[in-house]
Amino acid sequence: MKLEASAWTDPGPVRDNNEDAFFVDEDGGLFVVADGMGGHAAGEVASRIAVETITELLQGDLDPDETRLDRQVGDPGDILRERLRYAMNQASARIRREALANPPWAGMGTTACVLLIEGDGAHVAHVGDSRIYLWRGGRLSRLTRDHTVVQQEIDAGRLTPDMARRVAHRNYLTQSVGYHGPVEPDTATRPIAPGDVFMLCSDGVTDPLDDTRLAEIFEEADAPDLAERLVREAVAAGGEDNITAIVIRVVED
Ligand code: CA
């Protein structure tokens, strides 16, 4: 199986700067989206550091034993997930160090979602509210669960997903890379199949477009410009934030 990826980002109609950062490596099977936050352009700094640190650690020639949190695990999938957790935590530590050394950047942080495809396995990890979706067999499923206050309220039955989209505090994160210090990313592994289409995106896509609307757009999942189309749809739907999408297709060799 091989991967075909495309990505698109737009600062949106309101903001001058783009605090989203992303990374695409089709051959290496590594994809990252980070959505930074913080004043004085600190959001851009945080998301860039996160993307650089995570890709450096996962792609580099470093001893895999040096780049995982728990060195006791032996299963290859477990090792990869430990490496993802390690990379996220290294990024978090690096962002905090930069914030301490540069007072205007105090409090900066970022979301991060990572998709790493190795062999026939897709490994995902995330912190924050950037999401990973999978389009398979005409169905769109969300592979990540937002680290947000409203997601906790949905889980507790105090908010419906629909109400959660409209409350003022919908973007409050319970975890972020950098600002929150040590992070506990959610990680998972699932087998891939030809025809799968993955999407990584910032909340600039999912704030204006709910999952039903996203699925309608994915009905044309074969479109080579799907990432661009998703971003343009988010702008058309009133999105004001920075907007980023990466689309990855799994195709037969
Ligand atoms: Ca955002």
Image (cartoon, helix red, strand yellow):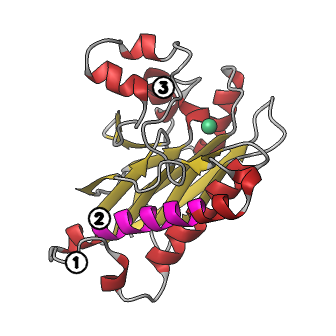
Label disc, if present, on residue 71 of the rendered structure: 1
* Residue toward you, 42 or 151: 42
What residue sits 38% from the left and 17% below the top? 161
Residue with the mark numbered 3: 216
Alpha carbons under labels 1 and 3: distance apart: 43 Å
User: Disc 1 on helix, strand or loop?
Assistant: loop
Alpha carbons under labels 2 and 3: distance apart: 32 Å
User: Disc 2 on helix, strand or loop?
Assistant: helix
Residue 39, horizontal then vertical, whole percent: 74, 42
Of the numbered discs 1 and 3, the one sitting upstream in the chain is: 1
Image: 167 above or below 230: above
- Ligand 1 found in image quarter: top right
The residue carrying pointer 1 sits among few (fewer than 14), some (14 to 19) or many (20 or more) residues within 10 Å by Cα, namely: some
Task: Name the dominant secondary structure of the magenta segment.
Answer: helix
Alpha carbons under labels 1 and 2: distance apart: 11 Å
Residue 29, horizontal then vertical, whole percent: 44, 68
Residue with the mark numbered 2: 81
Residue 131, horizontal then vertical, whole percent: 45, 41
| Region in magenta | 82-96
Q: Residue 155's image quarter?
A: top left
Label disc, if present, on residue 113 of the rendered structure: none
